Every structure is written in structure tokens, then in C-alpha cells.
Amino acid sequence: MLVTETPKGLYCPAGNFYIDPWQGVDRALVTHGHADHARWGSKRILTSESGRELVRARVGADPIIDTMAWGETRSIHGVRVSFHPAGHILGSAQIRLEVKGEVTVVSGDYNTRPDPTCEAFEPVRCHGFITESTFGLPIYRWPDSQQVFSEINDWWRSCQEAGKTAVIYAYALGKAQRILGGVNAAIGPILAHGAVYNFLQPYRDQGIALPLVEKATVEHAKATKGRALLVAPPSAQGTPWLKKFQPVSHAFASGWMTVRGGRRRRAMDRGFVLSDHADWPGLLMAIEATGAQEVGVTHGNGAPLARWLKDHGKQARVLQTQFLGEGAEETEPGGDD
Amino acid sequence: MHAFTSLFTQLDRTTKTLEKIRFLVRYFEQSAPEDAAWTVFFLTGKKIPRVVNTRLLREAVAEVADVPLWLVEECYDVVGDLAETVALLHPETTAHSSLPLHRMIQEELKPLRGLEDEEKKARLKVGWSTLSREERFVWNKLITGGFRVGVSRGIVARALAQTAGVEPAVMAHRLMGDWDPSERWWKQLLQGEGEAEPGKPYPFYLASPLEEGPEPLGAISGWQLEWKWDGIRAQVIKRQGTVMIWSRGEDVITDRFPEVVEALQALPDGTVLDGELLGWKQDRPLPFLDLQRRIGRKKVGKTLLADVPVILMAYDVLEAGGGELRSLPLEERRTHLENVVTGVGSPNIIMSEPVQAAGWDEAASLREQSRARGVEGLMLKRLGSPYLDGRKRGDWWKWKVDPFEVDAVLTYAQKGHGRRAGLFTDYTFGCWKDGELVTFAKAYSGLTDAEIQQVDRFVKANTLDRFGPVRQVKPELVFQLACEGIQKSSRHKSGIAVRFPRIARWRKDKKPEDADRLEDLLRWIP
Ligand SMILES: [Zn+2]
Ligand SMILES: [Zn+2]
């Protein structure tokens, strides 16, 4: 492997740079703009072109941000570096490193299923692969997303019949835009919480088709009562702001909704299984497609996936990282699931 | 199966009682009598005898899903429910079942009993393959038992009362006792025949806790005071020459208390008493833990009978001379009770005598003697009140003594089930003995959702060791536990047993070394 674990994050000694470090460093390669991957405090950052603005929103005005086009290669102290789509959110990348024919790929977060709001996942052959495992158990198998969107549309219509505002909680970056791009905007007006709204322009700038969305203000609450779909981050649940939209039906869109207890714990009326991470078959397929013999597992409870891979003839181990997996959605609205 | 699964999904999706009742009523009106009967059976918490053990379920799903058993275990650890784990692990199907619920049970589930393990597994796999994911979950639930859909007995009774057009209290009574779900039973349930069934108990009336003092209840002269006994609530029935003892959980526990049954034989036919089973020696109650030894045994040996003799402390009469007395005022029922108990004349049936107090002040000081008397506090019963059913507030209050409070250190944690599945919610606590923490209590309730999440994060970040699903954590967090009693116990390593421990609050202001010592706890043992 061309990267090792250090107290500051995943480090490439040959190139003297870090990937998604959790402390400030001189040079950071950043896979995507989620808060646990693009952290504040580094001096120079290299990321994908389409993800630039999202990373900028996390790290502030100070760092210099350089970008690379998909598949473009650049040498950093003799390490050939290239970025490849990870299918997770807009601009999310897997980072490929090559030294003297040895290839390591750091996946960041990835999703192998189609998502019209970001570039499609691209398998990259390598010797060593660092994979996420947010949903690294075989109970996680995503339903077809068209099916899920038609359930969301049906629920929205039934909310209208009951005179309720349909509130769907989703992470402000990535999941929220995916929902906006996937629902049937002909059903009614669509409102977005400010945290979601702020990320819409970077998506539109990259040519992603999104419907007309209004920022959810008190005036809009009155004007669209009982008809609107409101997309808000999970942290908005139970706030005085949300009360302005009553009566409401609460729904949550997340891979965690697979398990009944996950929905009941959050007191949700509905749970929609929609994730921007790979499910179990997706993880296994992606790992297989890399052809890697050595696999490092990050995020959440990686132990079962590592054990499974070992049982199937790979060298695998859990890497100690600070990427959020299990319960990330409860710690901060910007965290990812 | 399809209709029952839809009902389950609907109930599971709402938290509103009225909506749940509406779904239930619509389902009862539309479904066949046998299906409705089986639905009531499961939703009121009854189970069919286990036809498949959980090991077989695990093995069968491991085989169909092509995953090793250890991975099934990892999944179960996250899901917290085996029926759901199996439903999720099973490969996706496009099937769904049109077989009615009662036929599913009669033709597919019950016949599994007595088959060889391999044959059972083969049938499970065929069964699963004919169901959708939701149906598979419900089907597994029929096998494993324990439907938790936030539908209480009370809600089912209200929905049934609405369906039948009778008062909820009437329906609650019809639902009591032992019954087999069948078309005939369902018709009797709706039409009210069959109430003369000899073993049928009445619904218990449950006291509400008195949170503030008793002053708002008005003058003490309007109330009858009794000690609050710390035993097993029981309803005893003598009809047609047969004695039956029902627990509040509606189990028949007649066989466990032969000395009481013998005394009850002297009751006239057509008598029903409400009371408390108590371990009793030298005119005072034995600690509950002693009585617990009797509950676990179906056959009671001579030594145990001598160690823990049991009496019935009778405090109400619901039927006498074959007539129902529930609507009579408390004082009149008390006169009947005195007659019945005196008539039996056995030391194993004692009447719970009213406690005399001139005012609430005197009552309060009597209540302070509760621990010394081996009781839990005082009961306040409104004079003139009928015997109600369920937990209706107003006529019966329990005024318990304040609990013991112990500061303890969190030492182990395990993931919870149901609503809190996947979070560390089941805790083990220790107190200090010679510089080491000894385990003395387990508790899971009493924290807010936000606190549970904080503790959950603490556990994940501070795990010292794992023993299967149990995590040993850094001894750092201190909690104040409340408990009803502390007793010596040779079965516990700490040498003590605590009754009803629960978390009163999180003592963030305390360090682990500030927690209580075992010797402090020992001092409280009477
Ligand atoms: Zn992410
Ligand atoms: Zn991540």
C-alpha cells in the first residue's frame, strides 16, 4: 500500500501528502466535500473540478484549492496521481496513486448505484484498495431508487390529501439534492431549508437538473401549507422553525431506514431507504472489480467486512480513521451517511 | 397473510392511538372470523408454542443467504430482532402470499412441530421463498413471538368494543382468561356469549402512582388506607368446585401455591377474590426475593414450602354467591370480603386490614414505617368506588415509600432491542469493594433519547473488551440508581440483590471514585 495511517490521517510517504486528513496539513488530497473528509486547517488542497465549490464551503477562504479533471494525471514527488468518480455526491472522487507500477486507490465514500446528481462510479484496477464500509453488512441491500422515488411521491400526495406538509429529512449535501432531482415536481411546491438551499447553486453550476425550489421561509410556510414538500437536514427535527410548517408528516431518507428500529427511534412516520453509499453487494462488487489483493477498511464497523474478505482469500484489515460511519448522522447535519 | 401484514405495517407507521384503532376496526370488519381471532391472539401478546428454535432460524437463513453464521450474528447485533434480521438477510423475492392468516398458522406453522431439524429448515426455506420481505418478517414474528407494534391490550380492546358496539370495559372482560382463537370464539367475543366460562377472570383494576402528596385527594375520611403489599398480584376463582389462581399477566399459576389452593378449597362456589400472594412467616411478609424462588418452580419441594410459606392477602371480592359485585361500593364489597375470609378460617387466607389514621399527617408517618414492616407503602382506595378495570386514574392510588438511591459506575453495556435497537441501552453497574468495582445491578430505562445517544457514543469510544454482544467500558460514568429494596443474596457475586433498579439520573458532576461502596449498601439491609 502506498498510504499508511498516521495520527493526522491517511498519509502517502512517497508523495509527502495526506488524503482527507482530520488535522491541518501542508498538502491534502480531498475525495469530496462532506465534513468528515474535507476538514478545516490545511494549506493546500487538491480535489476534483466539479467538487471544488463544495470543498471550499467546508474549508473556508484561506486554503489554496487546485483541481484535476477526471482521469487527468499529475506527478507529486514521483507519485502519479489521478481522480476517478466515486458516485457518492457531486465531484466525489476515488484517488488513484501509482509508484513504479504499484497502484493504490483510496475510495473515500462511494456508491455503485446510478445517481443522476453526480458522476457515475468508475471501477479502477489496483493492487491495494482502501474502501469504506458504512453499510458493511449483508442486511443492507438497496431497493431500486425509482421504486423509492415513487413511494416518496405517493407519500407526498397522501400528505396533501391529509392537509399536511411533507417534511423529508436528508443530509444537506448530496442526499438532499438527490431527492430534489428525483421527486415529481409536478405534485406541488418544493421548499428547502437554508442549509440545503445553499448547496443548490454549486449543483446547478455543474449542469445538474434540479426543479424550482424555494428557500423555506415563514411566508412560504403560510403560502404552501398542506401542499409542499419540505427538504430539511435531520437537525431541523423538533425545532421551533419546523413548527411553522405544521401540520406535518415526518420522513427520513437514509440507508439506516433499512432497519425498523432506526426509523422508530427517530419517531418518523415514514422511512425511505435511499443512500449515497454502497450497499453490501455494491461493496463486494466494487472490491472485486479493483482486482486488489490488499484491502484496507474504513468507516464505522469495518470488522465484519474485513473478516469476510479474509475468508475469501484477500489480505484485509480495519484501518483506524476518523471518518464517521455508525451514527454519523446524529453528530452533525453535515456528516454523511 | 397479506392483509395481516398490511395491518401490521399500518400500525407500525403511526404513533397515534385513534389512527391505530381506526386501522384495527377496519381490519376486523373486513377479515374472516378465524383471521380476526388469530390477530387478536397475537396482538394481545399470546404466542403459539414454539415450533422452531432460534438456532434453526439462524442456520436456515445463513444457508439461503449464503453467509456464515458469525455474519448472521453480526447482523442480529445491529438489527436487534431475529425475525427482522432473517427477513432482511433473505434474498429478495417477488412473491407474496394470499393464504389467509389462520390457514398459514394451521397448515404451515403448526405442522412444523415435531419434525426433524433438517425437515424444518427445508420447510422454512420454502415458506420464506413464497413471501415478500414484510410478510417474511411478520411470519417470523409469528414463530418467535413478541409483536411490538405499540398496540397495547387496551387499544385492541377499544377497537374490538367499537367493532362489537359494546363498552370497552365489557370487551376487556371478554378478552380475559384462556381461549383458543377460532371462528366460534370470535363470534362469542362479538356477541358476548360464553361469559359463564368457569375459569374466566375479571380484568384487574390497577392503582396509579401518587406523584404529589395525598392532600389534593381531599379529606382522609373519604378514603380507605391499606398497606401496599410487595408480592404477586393474583385473582383467585372458585367455581364449580375448582380453584384457579390467575396472575396479572394472565397466567394460571394455581399449581405453584399448593398451600393456598388447599385453603381456597373451602371457598363457596362462585367466589372471586383479588389479592396478593405473599411469602409469610411469623405474622410478617418475607422479602420479595424469597417469594421469587417459588415463582420459578412448577413443582414445589418440601424444603421450599417450609422455607417460604405463601398466603393470600385478600383485599377485594369481585364475585360472591355466584353474583358479580364489581359495581358495589368499596365498603359493601369489604363486608362481603370479611364474611368470605372469616368463613374460610384458614391461616393461609388473610384479609388486608384497613390502616387507621386520623389525618394525612398521621398517614405520612405510618408510611415511613413501611420498610420496617416489609411493605412498599400505602394504598389509598376511594370509599364508595366500584371495582374498575385497567389503569383508570382516580379511585386507587399507590403511595410508595421513596426508593433507595445509589450512585453507581457504568461497567458494561449491551445493545437494546425494539425502538432502541442498535444503540447501547442495556447497562450493568458496579459499586466499590476493596478498591474494585463489583457488579450489583442492571438497568436500561430512565434516560432521555439524547442522553442515550451520548452514552452510546461513550461506549463505542471507550470499549475495553468485548464478550460477544457485551462491551466492557472504561469505568468513568456515574449514574444515580433508584431501587425498591436491597437484600442479601448468595446467588450474586456482590452478595446483594437489588429490586427494580432503574436510572434516576446521570451524575455528570461525580467522578467514579465518588460512587457508593458496597458496605454503604449493606447498611440498608433490614
Ligand atoms: Zn461522504
Ligand atoms: Zn465518509
Image (cartoon, helix red, strand yellow):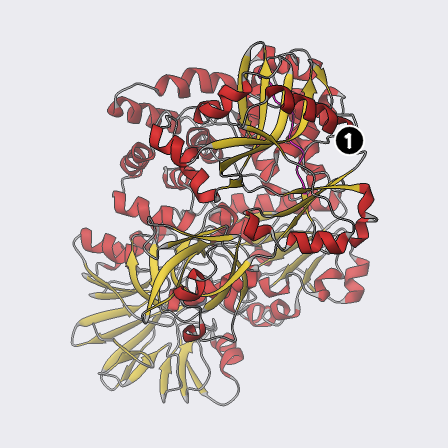
Name the chain letter of the residue that bears numbered label 1.
B
Whole-percent x, y for residue A135 in the image = 39, 55
Give the prevailing secondary structure in the magenta stretch: loop
| Residue at the (50%, 57%) spot, across then down | A116
- Element carrying mark 1: helix
Q: Nearer the viewer, residue A50 or B226?
A: B226
| Residue at the (42%, 29%) spot, across then down | B143
Which stretch is magenta? B199-207
Asked if residue B177 is positioned above or below residue A76 in the image, the reply reads above
Residue type at mark 1: give it. Glu
Number of marks in picture: 1
Residue that carries the numbered disc 1 in the rendered image: B331
Whole-percent x, y for residue B308 in the image = 42, 36
Is residue A177 something one can see in this rendering? no
Is residue A193 something one can see in this rendering? yes
| Residue at the (30%, 32%) spot, across then down | B56
Asked if residue B501 is positioned above or below residue A128 in the image, the reply reads above
* Residue B133 shown in magenta: no
Q: Nearer the viewer, residue B17 or B217?
A: B217
